[in-house]
Amino acid sequence: ETGVTQTPRHLVMGMTNKKSLKCEQHLGHNAMYWYKQSAKKPLELMFVYNFKEQTENNSVPSRFSPECPNSSHLFLHLHTLQPEDSALYLCASSQDPASSGEQFFGPGTRLTVL
Amino acid sequence: AQSVTQPDIHITVSEGASLELRCNYSYGATPYLFWYVQSPGQGLQLLLKYFSGDTLVQGIKGFEAEFKRSQSSFNLRKPSVHWSDAAEYFCAVGAPEYGNKLVFGAGTILRVKS
């Protein structure tokens, strides 16, 4: 595997379900990100992890719970979601957390909440 | 805080015609500037970036962009569009004092007619 991978690619869940999104980067980067991409809205930064530590939580509801066990893996745990949470969730990574460098994106997980 | 405006939501061009996608940013100094492309169902792929130096930057797939400080712009251009260029294009801006956070524009959807 190369680059940034995300699983699953598609997920349908009910509002009472608990599920997790997984992201893995094979680039040796030190920073990882979760973004939410909704129709007709700009890309929204959700969380930033630098060297496994969360450095940004962009006022994300607690029904989204990130986890970063190491610099290569990032999870987004989901529970009691709402239909408006349906979106494409993108993971990204970058090499240097200290500067606004290039971010490499995964293909995303298309989430549908029923 | 920095911000990005992409004035055109949709643009349609004929195959073989030239293309210019507009991007304006708001930031007091020289930001880091990026153009990304997203094909349907995919993540974002970096086309090109500007950090400093030559204001005309070359990217992949025959794209180029020019940084114009006086106009706070970073427009993306391609001399001859191919049908495979149909996608959504995002301009993004970063700044040293904001660490590794990027702010994205709302995107421009490019349609190519044959």
Image: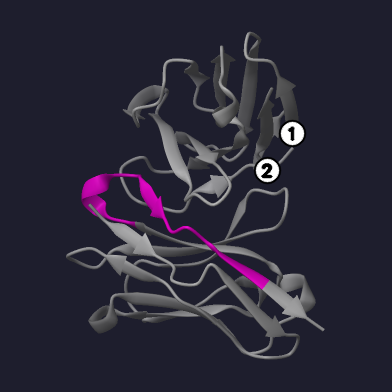
Residue under label 1, please give it.
A9
> Which image quadrant for residue B113?
bottom right
Q: CA distance from mark 2 to mark 1?
A: 8 Å
Q: Residue at x 35, y 32 (%)?
A: A58
- Relative horizontal placement of residue A87, taking residue B40 as reference (left or right): left
Q: Name the residue: 71% across, 70% down.
A: B86
* Secondary structure of the residue carrying numbered label 2: loop
Q: Is residue B107 magenta?
A: yes
Q: Position of residue B43 (x, y in %)?
A: 64, 48
**Residue A112: percent from left, percent from top:** 68, 29
| Residue type marked 1 | Arg
- Identify the disc placed on residue B41: none
> Taking the image as drawn, is residue A8 in sight?
no
Q: Vertical placement of B91 versus A4: above or below?
A: below
Instruction: Name which residue type carries label 2.
Output: Pro
Q: How many numbered circles does the render carry?
A: 2
- Give the vertical position of A62 relative to A108 (above or below): above
Asked if residue B96 is among those painted magenta in the image, a careful observer would answer yes
Q: Quadrant of the N terminus of chain A?
A: top right
Category of crowding for the residue at label 2, using alpha-carbon neighbours closer than 10 angstroms: few (below 14), some (14–19), many (at least 20): many
Q: Is residue B107 visible?
A: yes
Q: For residue B32, what is the image quadrant?
A: bottom left
Disc nearer the start of the sequence (2/1): 1
Where B14 falls versus B33 (above or below)?
below
**Chain bearing mark 1:** A
Q: Position of residue B66 (x, y in %)?
A: 42, 81
Q: Pointer 2: what residue?
A: A107
Whether label 2 touches label 1, CB < 8 Å: yes
Q: Residue furthest right?
A: B114
- Give the magenta-colored segment's residue range: B94-110
Q: Residue at x 67, y 34 (%)?
A: A109
| Chain letter behind tag 2 | A
